Image (cartoon, rainbow, N blue to C red):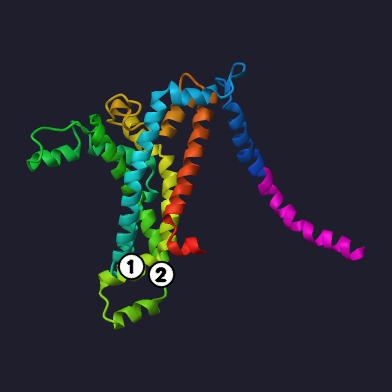
Amino acid sequence: MKKKSAFKKRNKWPYLFCLPFILAYGIFSLYPMLYSLQLSFFDWNGFGEKVFVGIQNYVTLFTKDPLFLKSLVNTVILMAFSTPITVLLGLGVAYLLFDVGRGKRLYQTVNFFPYITTPVAIGFIFSYLFDWQSGYINKIFTSIGILDEPFFWLGSEIASKVIIVIMVVWRWLGYYMVIYLAAMTALPSDVYEAAAVDGAGKFTIFTKITVPMLKNTTKFLLITSLIGGLQMFEEPKLLFGGWAALGNGQTGGPGYTALTTVWKFYNDAFGLDSRLGYGSAIAYTLFVVIVTFTIVGFRISRGRGDRDE
């Protein structure tokens, strides 16, 4: 009996130490998520009486709201282009800087600066660079003869998507570089020494040794990129809602070509005509999409050896 009571007394402390986190998570994360799920079945603007509408919000999303489907397609396109470019460039830059001797820290810091830059500043920079009247991109292209007259970059549907992809790659390249550099430092050096003794060149070492050994790191970055890409909001919102953005902060860019799903959710849930129930339906639909893409991406990124385990 004494042993049983001593056992209970000794093992209660881990639960007590975990209790503050569990309470905080339940109050500030779990409860809002469950409440949002419940709210998606109601029509409510945040002030009046909630009206139960069942699955009508979800039906409206796919049958009567073409902007939602367009925003979902835009998000997938932007994610599909930005993710592989960022991963490949991050891997390449990390490999180039890994063996750099003098000035290595400086090069790493310069490449990492965009990641710690505030999103508002990034939106301002790209809005200014691609501005129709005073942007430096138009000035450079017209001065060297590529363009005869300034091009309205932010008024073109294709150019708008390209600019957003460039923003995403420029902003996140430093983060991917740091992750790959950290993974490369953990690789065993004897493998490289053996390859050098056998006469393998740098390109062969990179493609046959470095890339395969970084498989788990690449998988991690791909999965997190899929999740982050489907939640894209800051880059298009700041590009078309900030300074020099079409002059009036147009929602979604020209022809809504830059409208992402999270931007759509933000407009419907917190705009002038607040529709919190409808916004909750958008949020949970996006959640299902993210889970689906994550599972598919994880299965695709698994190698044959992983499947056999």
Cβ atoms at labels 2 and 1 below 8 Å apart: yes
Image coordinates of residue 25 in percent, x first then y, are: 64, 44
User: Does residue 121 appear anywhere in the picture?
Assistant: no
- Crowding around mark 2 (Cα neighbors within 10 Å: few <14, some 14 to 19, many 20+) is few
- The secondary structure that dominates the magenta segment is helix
Res. 176 image quadrant: bottom left
Snapshot quadrant of residue 154: top left
Q: Would residue 6 be counted in the magenta stretch?
A: yes
Name the residue that disc number 2 marks.
185
**Would you say 280 lies left or right of 71 here?**
right
Q: Residue 82 at x, y = what percent?
A: 33, 46
Answer few, some or many: residues within 10 Å of disc 1's Cα (few below 14, many 20 plus, some between 14 and 19): some
- Give the camera-side residue of 12 and 114: 12
Mark 2 or mark 1: whose residue is earlier in sequence: 1
| 174 in relation to 309, above or below | above
The spot of residue 76 in percent (x, y) is 37, 39
Describe residue 76's horizontal placement relative to residue 133 as left or right.
right
Which residue shows up at 33% across the image and 57% down it?
Answer: 90
Q: Residue furthest bottom?
A: 197
- Depth order, front residue of 184/215: 215
Span of residues in magenta? 1-23
Q: Say what amino acid the circle numbered 1 marks.
A: Phe
Judging depth in this view, the residue of 141 and 32 nearest the camera is 32
Residue 124, visible in the rendered structure: yes
Query: What residue does disc 1 label?
Result: 98
Residue 222: percent from the left, percent from the top?
Answer: 41, 52
Number of numbered callouts drawn: 2
